Image: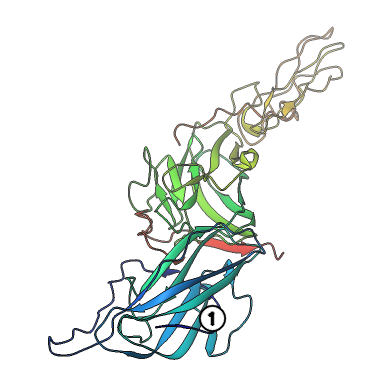
Amino acid sequence: MRSALRPTAACVAAAAIGIGVPVFAVPVAHADEASPDLVVSALPSAAPKPGEVYDRSVTVTNKGTAPAHGFTFRIRLTRGLDFPQHADGCVYSTIADQVRQALCKVDTVIDPGASVTAPVRFKALPKALMEAVEYGTSPTGETPTGGFDDSYRRLALTADSTADLLAQGDLAEGGPGSRVTVTATLRNDGPGWIRQQEGDDQPALKVRIPSGTVAVEVPADCAPFGTDGPTGPSAPGHSTYVCAPADHTIDADQFLDYGFVLRIAKNAKDTRGEVTVSSVHGVRPAFDKNPANDTAYLNVDVTGGGEPGTGTSGGTTTGGGSGAGGSGTGGRGNDPHGRTTGGSGATGTTGTTGGTGTSGGTGTAGSASGTAGSASDTSGTAGSDGILAATGSDGMPLLAGAAVGATAIGGLALWAVRRRTTGK
């Protein structure tokens, strides 16, 4: 005997459901007791485009020895999916992690060996990407209470869409021995929201600390990075980190900021590190079709501490007096952004004797000569901009069926991670 159910609506799945959850604890019937045993068929996979409606049916079969006097059919959808409409006999709600749920009471009696069909319908939202659907009942027809088995199933699907992750860097300046803060940012320009439903290669940001600096305070969500993944909990002093949100989720139009406190070495020069869109295991996400914005830089301009006459480290040494026709020249170089900076010292007037001029360091004004003999300006600040070339760096969902990766991101929260949206 086969009877039809009224259409049910699909509902959004709760994040983190199915991670380490035991399989249903099915009531055990004694040998002389008859009981129903409901089994639900599997939904076919799909890759819906945003706006498309998925409309399929599953079969609920009683393989037990007693009739099932009605049953509860539950559907859960992740946040990129929704119900196209509400069906009679179903109660709809939004539960944890933006999961939408439908609980549908079906009064049909299913005798042993008989089946009924249950429609499962949902639509893909504009932000749909990595999604999952839970659907079914329990062996006895009651509301599901545990993991997945033949009565309650899970379908992971990837919508026909993309998400554009991009990296943003920062610029700071400070003297040798000082501490500066730089912020590495991971941004999702959408349209899809991101949480890896199948596997542990969660989206992340790889951060290479600028050479000549040491990370002395590190965000709790940033772990030291080894050859192909995290090597332990958050800790200062490493050259490369991988940063990922603790819930492994990045919504569309969301920013994740990771602040690092760096100590500048006493002999450091202008330097920069690198931030790169990645995953917790160093793999570029396949859903991101725009690699052009995957890399940015953490620039540190070091002020003071320059060698005489070079205008090193952003200490601006300009000038030097001169006799008639004489001139003094400051330092010239490239900053970490690739800009050519620095300039010539001003041409002095008739020189008189003088001392050295310093600006934030020891840059001594160059001597100048003219018809009146050598002279130096007592008030000169050496070199014009005096920024040297960069020297580089030394090193560097819902319902989740698989365990979310062992990112080993923990430790003391030395620096807060900010999570914000663009307000789109």
Q: Nearer the viewer, residue 246 or 101?
A: 101
Across and down, in percent, residue 420 comes to: 61, 63
Residue 316 position (above or below residue 67): above
Q: Residue at x 59, y 73 (%)?
A: 82
Q: Quadrant of residue 215?
A: top left
Residue at the image point whose x is 49% and y is 34% from the top: 211
**Residue at 32% of width from left, 50% of height from top?**
232
**151 left or right of 118 in image:** left
Q: In this view, does 424 lie above or below 229?
A: below
Tell me where residue 137 sits by quadrant.
bottom left
Residue most extreme to the top: 371
Can I make out residue 293 in this image? yes
Label 1 environment density (alpha carbons within 10 Å; few <14, some 14–19, many ≥20):
many
User: Is 81 located above or below residue 104 in the figure?
Assistant: above
**Disc 1 on helix, strand or loop?**
loop
Is 311 on the left or on the right of 32, as rendered?
right
Q: In this view, does 348 lie above or below 200?
A: above
Residue 285, x across and y down, in percent: 52, 46
- Judged from this view, the residue extending furthest toward the left is 31
Q: Nearer the viewer, residue 174 or 55?
A: 55
> Residue at label 1?
8
Depth check: 37 or 385 in front? 37
Determine if residue 13 is in view. no
Residue occupying image coordinates x 82% and y 9%:
370
Give the quadrant of the N terminus.
Answer: bottom left
